[in-house]
Amino acid sequence: MPSLEEELFPSTPGKFKDRNRHFHRCFASTSTMFLWALFLIALTASYICFQSFMDSGNRYFTATWGGHHWEKNVINSAQIRRSHGGMSVLVTGAAGFVGSHVSLALKKRGDGVVGIDNFNNYYDPSLKKARKNLLNQNSIFIVDGDINDSKLLVKLFDIARFTHVMHLAAQAGVRYAMENPGSYIHSNIAGLVTLLEVCKNSNPQPAIVWASSSSVYGLNEKVPFSESDRTDQPASLYAATKKAGEEITHTYNHIYGLSITGLRFFTVYGPWGRPDMAYFSFTRNILQGKPITVYRGKNRVDLARDFTYIDDVVKGCIGSLDTSGKSTGSGGKKRGPAPYRIFNLGNTSPVTVPMMVAMLEKHLKVKAKKNFVVMPGNGDVPFTHANISSARKEFGYKPTTDLQTGLKKFVKWYLSYYGYDQGKL
Ligand SMILES: O=C(O)[C@H]1O[C@H](OP(=O)(O)OP(=O)(O)OC[C@H]2O[C@@H](n3ccc(=O)[nH]c3=O)[C@H](O)[C@@H]2O)[C@H](O)[C@@H](O)[C@H]1O
């Protein structure tokens, strides 16, 4: 005789249905679903945890600074290798145009040099990588990092006692400021303050030489531009951030005793230059048979620049470092007044843009297809012209390369780097 249970729940399901059985089956399937749901939730949660672990792990593993080997590289690179008056310099923007040249020049005379660069993609990062390789071949170590990373900067100052900082990291370019204003604030304002904070706290404090710009003269019409001229009418956000940099560095000099030298560069050009600049992009276009756009001022007046050759600017940077004097503070406290200086580093002989194009045509042996357009209201200024008597007086600054000679050297480098056919690819 079947038990009650067997009666109610026969071994062959489906043979008979009663309400109880239905209830139990429903319950059983709901609880199974519940368990499945729990299982799925747990699975998803573990997956999310795993992913975030992997992410943080990746961040850790791809961290480009830190570790024994890295520290050894920094220490070696920072080491002074000459007997008298050597300096140990942190060069920011070392994979940049001016930064790479200054780093090589310092290293050549036996100074210690450590570079830092964030290798951003404002222009082709492969050119920055190539400059980095060149520096590495000359025993200069470049840290892959951003000047906004205060932990990294503190670490660098901990392990290498820099006597000087050559601060060249910046968001450059006058017209790009309308496209990406934030990048100017990030590098030229926030990055500058982060660097100054670390310098002010370090012990001993380094002397700082940094890149301002001829663009601070903005709408100034008095020529040639002297350091004492008005600089309160910037024509671009780029210029405004450089002017702000001059004010910001002044406060750090005033409050903390940091020795500060600001250099107003005038349209620096030459081998290993910046592809975003006119002479460089014109060269590329001319070789590719593409037209170039030449801006003109009102009433068809040609624009002019006080183009300054890179080797002259490098001499100006090194002269500034050599004469910078000492910061007086330590550990964030000022002990006395420190030098605060600003110098024009120009060429003192402006050349019009069409004349610059004619020189390129000559060196490239190719005619340019020129489109003349009225200068758009994008931050450009009609002309620049430096008075360099202050820099001459202070450290014997004397530019020796005219535009014709400098462009010849640039073209030679361009063709050796990219090749004749590169432009046609
Ligand atoms: O001294 C500085 O402080 C700045 O110098 C440089 O700015 P600029 O002097 O404006 O150089 P650059 O762009 O080469 O234009 C040169 C000329 O070509 C004209 N120009 C430009 C582009 C174009 O397509 N057509 C044209 O006619 C243009 O109107 C201008 O007349 C740096 O880029 C900048 O980062 C900053 O360091």
Image: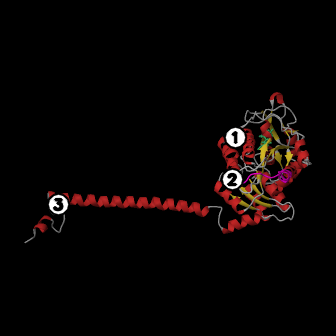
Could you say where residue 233 lies in the image, as x and y percent from the top left?
Answer: 76, 33
| Mark closest to the chain's N terminus, 3 or 2 | 3
Residue wearing tag 2: 198
Nearer mark to the viewer, of 3 and 2: 2
> 425 or 170, which lies in front?
170
Q: Please check the rendered image and state whether residue 319 is part of the magenta-colored stretch, yes or no.
A: yes
Q: Are marks 3 and 1 in contact (CB under 8 Å)?
A: no
Residue 28 in the image: x percent, y percent?
24, 61
How far apart in space, not on screen, are marks 3 and 2 (Cα)? 76 Å
Q: Residue at x 89, y 47 (%)?
A: 394
Q: Which residue is mark 1?
A: 177
Residue 270 part of the magenta segment: no
Residue segment shown in magenta:
317-331
Mark 1: secondary structure: helix
Neighbour tally class for label 1: few under 14, some 14-19, many 20 plus, Cα within 10 Å: many
Where's residue 5, x and y in %?
Answer: 13, 67
* Mark sitting earlier along the chain (3/1): 3
Q: Is residue 302 visible?
A: yes
Magenta stretch, main secondary structure class: loop
Spatial separation of the CA atoms under disc 1 and disc 2: 27 Å
Q: Residues within 10 Å of mark 3 (few under 14, many from 20)?
A: some
Determine if residue 347 is in view. Answer: no
Q: Tell me the residue that label 3 is attached to.
A: 21
Quadrant of ligand 1: it is top right
